[in-house]
Image: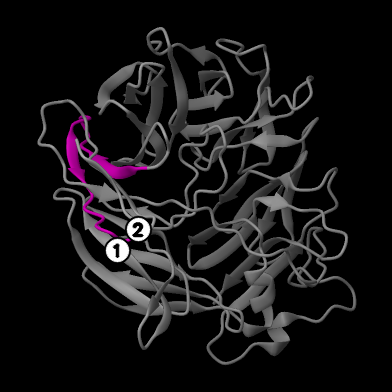
Amino acid sequence: MAVLLAAGGGVYAAVGGDDGGENPTASPTTTTPSHSKTQDPTPEPTTGDGDNTGGRGNGESDPNDQRRAGEAKVLYQKPAPEVSKVNLEVPGFWAMKGYVVKAVENKIVAYKDEGGSKWTLSLPKAVCAAPTSTTDGKVVVAYAGHGKDSCSQLALIDLNKGVKLWDHPAPERDALGGGYTNVGMAQSGNLVGMAWFGGSAVIKVSDGKEVSPEKPSAGCSIDGYAGGRVLLRAYSCSNGTAKLQQLTLSGSIKWTYTIRKGFKVSNIFSSSPAVVALIDQDRRSGGILALSGKGKERSTLALGKQSYQPECGTDIFGTNMGNCEGVAVSADTFYLPTEMTQDHGLGSTSEIHAFDLTTGKRKWAVKVAERLLLPLNMDGKNLIAYEKPTYTAPGRIVRIDPSGGKPATLLRLPQATQKAERDFYSATHTYHNGNFYIATNRITGSDTTAESLLMAFGR
């Protein structure tokens, strides 16, 4: 296995498992959190039922009054509420049919696409961790427990009705000193995987009871889980070994993949098909690996000397394995955004590269000028992507067909909300049923600027 460091800061490593497959070629990976500035004032909304003001308060102008030909409609804007402390993380956002649901501290609110709130649910304390995927419209969230910074109470929320179905303490198995900090959660089917600093657990969505998958051997610990179609878990050991496993619907181990010694899983971009980022113990080199549905090595992506920039946020302890934005996957293709680079004659450009999951080779690249181009999700065989706003122009939602080619605009976001769109510090971006949503992941609590909680756009 060769490991090389390039003078320009690109890092390369041959990565792969020890299951008898061919040694993959050297390839780099760079994952960089992306944050914007704090916000400038945006219109104040009202949130009660029957609010058809588009999220405006009394006396505030409607951004749709400034709507230009061809621009998307602003469905609503919601400002960030006052919160208990500065730089507060506010996890929990889900897009449903005709509405979205956002958690902020101890409130979980459903916002209708046509304006107004559908329901509001209060919990005893603040939501501190939540999966991104749901099961039949139900999701398990974690909220603050009794100890300081303890994210140790679990509740099952019905996102269709806005009710709490059960409420239990988190399992204490493997807890280091009984604390629950930096909790990461992933949900798939009837299972929720939890990882925190010093412990981990798997529980059932239906009743909150713990299931007991096979424990890692001595000297090993669970790093994190990723959900969606299936539930994956990654763990690493003090002797430099690491593994990736898929759990069955009942919580047993379906397959185990052994990571090449000296490397571990840093992010799980997709659980099915499995696509993961690996990194070495010094966090200086790594690569991206695709696995088959049976846990066998499928390919290592040939990333070349390009640096890539999925938005994986800040995860100091690595417990949020599946929290990366800006990537998308189909059955046979993985889509990855590059960082902004200088292109002679075009100024700054960014690209999306499509990789064949069977061969690991790049199939095509799509380039845009002066914008960061991020994959969002798949719409059938087409890729949906977000052209992020510039300092002067709003963003766009585009469709890219399976062969690449020029992106086709689906939504051209309005100039009137360009600044609010750009000034989210950290956000989740979702395109669902023809609408585009931006939901904040953190409220800075600045005294000098107004902050947005949520923005929604449609035709």
Mark 1, secondary structure of its residue: strand
| Crowd class of label 1 (few under 14; some 14 to 19; many from 20; radius 10 Å) | many
The answer to whether residue 381 is seen in the rendering is: no
Q: What residue type is labelled 1?
A: His
Residue 86, image x and y in percent? 81, 47
Q: What residue type is labelled 2?
A: Leu
| Crowd class of label 2 (few under 14; some 14 to 19; many from 20; radius 10 Å) | many
Dots 2, 1 in contact, CB < 8 A: yes
* 107 in relation to 69, above or below: above
Of all residues shown, which one is farthest toward the top? 218
- What's drawn in magenta, residue-wise? 285-307
Residue 84, image x and y in percent? 85, 43
Mark identifier at residue 336:
2
Left or right: residue 101 versus residue 351 is right
Label count reads 2
Nearer to me, 249 or 127: 127
What residue is rendered at 89% in x and 74% in y?
58
Image quadrant occupied by the N terminus: top left
**Residue 209 in magenta?**
no
Nearer to me, 394 or 142: 394
What residue is rendered at 39% in x and 86% in y?
346
Look at the image and name its color scheme: one colour
